[in-house]
């Protein structure tokens, strides 16, 4: 299959290296282009990054094809594709599925199934998962098809240009209808898995909005302004409203066998076209049933 490539137009004269940096191409990506079979062309001629550009020069970066890592075994399975093009794959992950293989669950992960999708469709890519979800959490996952696109998405996340919203069911009733939790999160001293609010942790911020109250729990919408491990789960538990089903952080597994958390929407700027794009995912059946049971 033809390798992924992008073409840019030089706005001014100057060093090619500087223009590539301005276009968001990282040093690591440039190294892979140089040493792993890629090319940089100016007006159709191969050049090095020391080339001096003239205004309106056409610069084409041909990225090397990537191969799946040896440890990732492609597996056939159901894959709910929400969007796909040469740069991105957006999928809707079911609950109780790992995003990547783990020691406890070495097979059946989303990554295994996406690897099979790439192999069957002869897509020369490895997996670059930009928005990972916990095993229990369902909803939208964004996957880049090459290193450069992953870098561009990471820059969007750091610049808060990528926005994710979550549906969650939390124990109890909230005193406020709309508020922000800003508490640092770090690893718990007594566990390699659990996180907690602690003053020496990393800055973490979660937006909370109450949508509807039920008998015993509240449906809330959440927005992440940072992406710490277990952030939503830790923050809600810290304020006394753990997620339903989240027994690791104080929730009760009555009526649901996993934490009641779902990534409902994803907004980003397409890393190639520059156009804003957005996707949504409806609540999964097990969370819907909790609502129906209370009506």
Image: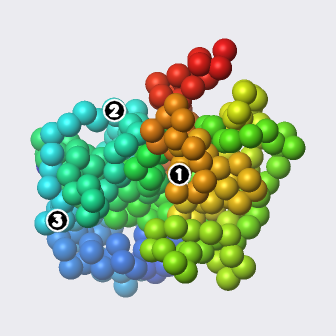
Find residue 43 and name its label: none
Q: Secondary structure at mark 1?
A: helix
Residue 143, percent from left and from top: 38, 51
Q: Nearer the viewer, mark 2 or mark 1?
A: 1
Q: Quadrant of the C terminus?
A: top right
Specify whether residue 161 is in view: no
Question: In this image, 138 relative to 62: left or right?
Answer: right
Question: In this image, 116 relative to 292: left or right?
Answer: left
Residue 33 vs residue 105, the one in the foreground: 105
Q: CA distance from mark 3 to mark 2?
A: 23 Å
**Circles 1 and 3: CB atoms closer than 8 Å:** no
Total labels drawn: 3
Label 1 environment density (alpha carbons within 10 Å; few <14, some 14–19, many ≥20): some
Q: Nearer the viewer, mark 1 or mark 3?
A: 1
Residue 228 occupies which quadrant of the picture? Answer: bottom right
Residue 134, percent from left and from top: 44, 53
- Choose the circle earlier in sequence order: 1 or 3: 3
Q: CA distance from mark 2 to mark 1?
A: 28 Å
Residue 151 occupies which quadrant of the picture? Answer: bottom left
Find residue 247 and name its label: 1
Find residue 80 and name its label: 2
Residue at the disc numbered 3: 71
Residue drawn 58% across and 57% down?
A: 249
Residue drawn 68% across and 53% down?
A: 236
Specify whether residue 26 is in view: yes
Q: CA distance from mark 1 to mark 3?
A: 31 Å
Residue 256 vs residue 102, the one in the foreground: 256
Q: Secondary structure at mark 3?
A: loop
Label 3 environment density (alpha carbons within 10 Å; few <14, some 14–19, many ≥20): few
**Circles 3 and 2: CB atoms closer than 8 Å:** no
Residue 281 vs residue 154, the one in the foreground: 281
- Choose the circle earlier in sequence order: 2 or 1: 2
């Amino acid at each position: 299959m033809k390798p992924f490539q992008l073409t840019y137009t030089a706005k001014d004269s100057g060093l090619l290296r500087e223009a590539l940096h301005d276009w968001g191409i990282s040093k690591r990506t440039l190294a892979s282009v140089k040493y792993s079979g890629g090319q940089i062309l100016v007006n159709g001629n191969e050049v090095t990054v020391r080339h001096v550009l003239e205004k309106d020069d056409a610069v084409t970066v041909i990225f090397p094809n990537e191969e799946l890592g040896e440890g990732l075994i492609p597996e056939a399975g159901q894959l709910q594709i929400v969007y796909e093009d040469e740069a991105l794959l957006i999928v809707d992950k079911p609950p109780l599925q790992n995003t990547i293989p783990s020691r406890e669950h070495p097979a059946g992960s989303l990554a295994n199934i996406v690897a099979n999708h790439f192999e069957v469709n002869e897509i020369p890519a490895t997996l670059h998962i930009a928005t990972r979800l916990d095993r229990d959490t369902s909803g939208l996952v964004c996957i880049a098809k090459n290193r450069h696109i992953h870098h561009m998405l990471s820059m969007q996340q750091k610049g808060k240009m990528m926005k994710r919203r979550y549906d969650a069911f939390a124990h109890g009733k909230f005193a406020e209808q709309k508020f922000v939790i800003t508490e640092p999160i770090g690893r718990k001293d007594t566990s390699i898995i659990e996180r907690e609010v602690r003053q020496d942790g990393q800055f973490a911020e979660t937006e909370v909005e109450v949508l509807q109250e039920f008998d015993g729990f509240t449906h809330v919408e959440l927005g992440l302004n940072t992406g710490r491990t277990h952030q939503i789960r830790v923050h809600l538990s810290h304020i006394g409203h753990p997620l339903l089903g989240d027994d690791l952080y104080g929730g009760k597994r009555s009526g649901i066998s996993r934490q009641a958390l779902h990534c409902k929407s994803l907004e980003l700027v397409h890393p190639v076209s520059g156009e804003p794009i957005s996707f949504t995912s409806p609540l999964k059946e097990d969370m819907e049933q909790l609502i129906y049971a209370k009506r």
